[in-house]
Image: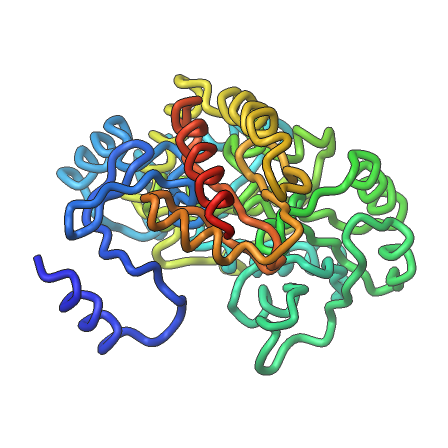
């Protein structure tokens, strides 16, 4: 397999989107992915938080193969056995929510969530957070508070508050405010979290003003923060939760969780998605939920997050470890791009962020202490080399 030829071919025919790792990944298993040249990499990135259950988890693969032998696709215009089972499993894992809307991505889920909030309240205004990221479609991008992504013609009905400041949110309230949308932990911005009082304050504010509270849990959901949902970790009940990334262990899928009172306001035809809730994606979703529960992966995320914080404490140049569970940011006192590049040469994949001094760790939830120790040794070596 000619690795260089494959890279050139992809560059020749695919539109420029991401600056890619110099890797041609051809297979994965558990915590590892393998390059076309046979090199194996320890994956602390998870394909951007997608490989929740690890790469090619045998139970997920078995469920997908079983579904492929039965029915690859039919839309929501007909009922589906696996869709019914997947919806039941998801709602059962989300206490307080009554209905789910299936779609294909986080951006689509966030667009739907804001539309639902506007319909329910009869208002149009959205308050989002500076530093938040909600997707690249027009509506989702309009609620994204990272400047470099805000290109093109955006919606004018979104205003931006300082993340973590209730007073900043209050200053933006208007009679036409329909919803507040936020990532409970801002991942791309550098893994920013606020105190529990902030989230509870948002809930109280929304209750007092008749405003919908939307948690974008595309990256924080499904056990990553140590609970099934970050809302549970922060002790807050949002009106709507959006999901995507790893909820089907790599099969493209998004979802919007709605409380019953909200769902009742949506009529036939107001939301739809041709591929949303496809049989294959639903098979992946159901298997993923089962693996998270059976293998106690949310609990493992909490334990391993604490182990990482303990293990990395006192590391040269490290200011602190941000985040919860296995959505973590290693904050240094300098630019970390050199560290990420050097770690790749040590056969470890990590992620950078919009904060130039923060490395992100988004590993599969199956991670163990030996994997953390391997990263720790490699990072000490990289830092000793002057990165």
**Quarter of the image containing the N terminus?**
bottom left
Name the colour scheme.
Answer: rainbow
Q: Is residue 315 left or right of residue 7?
A: right
Quarter where residue 366 is shown: top left
**Which residue occupies the extreme bottom position in the image?**
153
Q: Is residue 79 visible?
A: yes
Quarter where residue 232 is shown: top right
Q: Which residue is more in the foreground, 81 or 167?
A: 167
Q: Is residue 277 left or right of residue 139?
A: left
Q: Is residue 77 above or below residue 46?
A: below
Q: Is residue 235 above or below residue 55?
A: above
Residue drawn at x 29%, y 42% as measured from the top left: 41
Q: Is residue 317 above or below residue 158?
A: above
Q: Which residue is more in the foreground, 182 or 277?
A: 182
Q: Position of residue 220 (x, y in %)?
A: 57, 40
Q: Is residue 283 visible?
A: no
Residue drawn at x 71%, y 34% as measured from the top left: 237
Residue drawn at x 40%, y 47% as measured from the top left: 343
Q: Which residue is more in the foreground, 91 or 329?
A: 329
Q: Position of residue 241 (x, y in %)?
A: 61, 43
**Which residue occupies the extreme left position in the image?**
1
Residue drawn at x 26%, y 36% as measured from the top left: 56
Q: Position of residue 37 (x, y in %)?
A: 15, 51
Q: Position of residue 78 (x, y in %)?
A: 32, 47
Q: Is residue 127 left or right of residue 367?
A: right
Quarter where residue 79 is shown: top left
């Amino acid at each position: 397999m000619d690795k260089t030829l494959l890279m050139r071919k992809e560059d020749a025919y695919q539109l420029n989107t991401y600056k890619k790792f110099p890797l041609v990944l051809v297979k994965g298993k558990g915590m590892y992915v393998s390059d076309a040249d046979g090199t194996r990499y320890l994956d602390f990135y998870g394909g951007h938080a997608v490989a929740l259950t690890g790469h090619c988890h045998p139970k997920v693969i078995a469920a997908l193969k079983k579904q492929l032998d039965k029915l690859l696709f039919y839309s929501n215009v007909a009922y589906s056995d696996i869709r019914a089972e997947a919806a039941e499993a998801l709602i059962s894992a989300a206490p307080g929510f009554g209905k789910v809307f299936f779609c294909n991505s986080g951006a689509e889920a966030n667009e739907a969530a804001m539309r639902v909030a506007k319909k329910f309240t009869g208002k149009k205004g959205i308050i989002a957070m500076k530093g938040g990221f909600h997707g690249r479609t027009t509506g989702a991008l309009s609620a994204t508070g990272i400047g470099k992504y805000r290109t093109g013609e955006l919606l004018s009905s979104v205003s931006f508050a300082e993340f973590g400041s209730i007073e900043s949110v209050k200053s933006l309230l208007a009679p036409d405010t329909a919803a507040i949308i936020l990532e409970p932990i801002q991942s791309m911005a550098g893994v920013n979290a606020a105190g529990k009082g902030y989230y509870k304050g948002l809930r109280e504010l929304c209750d007092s003003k008749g405003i919908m509270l939307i948690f974008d849990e595309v990256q924080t959901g499904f056990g990553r923060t140590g609970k099934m949902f970050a809302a549970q970790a922060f002790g807050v009940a949002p009106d709507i939760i959006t999901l995507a990334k790893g909820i089907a262990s790599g099969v493209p899928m998004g979802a919007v969780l709605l409380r019953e009172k909200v769902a009742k306001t949506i009529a036939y035809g107001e939301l739809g998605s041709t591929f949303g809730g496809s049989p294959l994606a639903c098979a992946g979703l159901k298997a993923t939920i089962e693996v998270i529960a059976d293998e106690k992966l949310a609990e493992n995320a909490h334990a391993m997050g604490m182990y990482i914080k303990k293990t990395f404490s006192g590391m040269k140049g490290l200011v602190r470890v941000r985040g919860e569970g296995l959505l973590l940011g290693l904050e240094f006192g300098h630019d970390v791009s050199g560290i990420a590049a050097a770690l790749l040469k040590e056969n470890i994949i990590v992620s950078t962020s919009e904060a130039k001094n923060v490395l992100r760790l988004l590993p599969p939830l199956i991670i163990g202490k030996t994997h953390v120790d391997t990263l720790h040794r490699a990072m000490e070596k990289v830092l000793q080399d002057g990165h």
